[in-house]
Amino acid sequence: MNDRLASRRYRLGLSLFRGSVLWLRWSLLLWVVATPILSVALSNVFEVGLWTITASIFQWFVAVTAGFWIYQNLPASIARGITRRELTVAYLVFGALTTVGTAALVTAGFAAEHALLAWFAEPFGTWGEALGQGARYLLITPIYFFTGTFIGAAAARFAGRAWFTIAVLLGTGLHYTGLLALEFRDLGSGGVAAWIAIALAVAAVLVTASVLTLRSAPVAAK
């Protein structure tokens, strides 16, 4: 029984990831199948592959999924006896699984798009550049995920207050502008190490903010 209780946090994290995949499964299937094909069909229209655009848009789904669940379920989960520590660990597991899964899917999409363009049209860049773009999401996805988590957890406490709504609108706009600059930054010679350091620092700040918010006292009643 103690072992089962001890592992509950990890099972919850796995359950959250599995449930999110099931929730998004049809959207994911449509995205994965249609986008590389459309990228070939519209290769003369866009200066970059459609996968680059849609991979970035998909990060919003990641952020919204993370934030929406915690906003909707944080008070009820605590009421059911799940501790804040368990929820925090579960969300770290959820975030790690989401990061690995998303980065793998995005990288596979870049590879599929590049292969189709090489066969039917003209690819955007080299194989190395295509795979490198996908690998970026190992550090980009956790930024989106824990941005959503932080906002969702804060909303569970402060939603409905005017200052909170204003802060979210202003903060999210500024944050997203900086995140897009980071996501699509040109990693020319010598720029990779700096990019990794910045991405890790931003992710670390957001993880810390999310953990502190999840584990802080009390949740306002809805």
Image: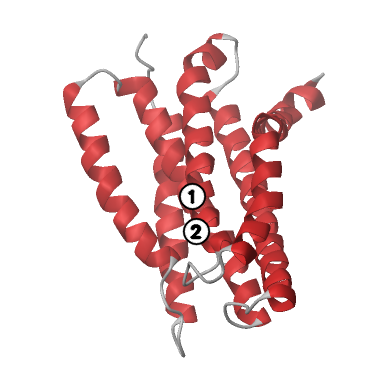
Which quarter of the figure has residue 83? top right
Q: Secondary structure at mark 2?
A: helix
- Farthest bottom residue in view: 189
Left or right of 133: which side holds 118?
A: right
Q: Residue at x 59, y 10 (%)?
A: 80
**Label 2, on which residue?**
53
In the displayed structure, does residue 189 sit left or right of residue 109?
left
Mark 1 sits on what residue? 57
Asked whether, in this view, residue 217 is left or right of residue 169, the answer is right
Q: Which quarter of the figure has residue 39? A: bottom right
Residue 197 at x, y percent in the picture: 45, 71
Q: Residue at x 31, y 51 (%)?
A: 175
Kind of residue at badge 1: Ile
Q: Front-most of 126 and 194?
A: 126
Q: Residue 140 at what x, y percent from top left?
A: 50, 58
The image shows residue 127 at horizontal and vertical percentages of 68, 80
Q: Please state the total of marks drawn on the protein image.
A: 2
Q: Residues within 10 Å of mark 1 (few under 14, many from 20)?
A: few
Q: Residue at left 49%, top 58%? A: 53
Report the front residue among 178 and 114.
Answer: 114
Alpha-carbon distance for marks 1 and 2? 6 Å
Name above or below for residue 176 compared with residue 167: below
Spot occupied by residue 186 in the image (x, y as percentages of width and height): 42, 78
Q: Amino acid at mark 2?
A: Ile
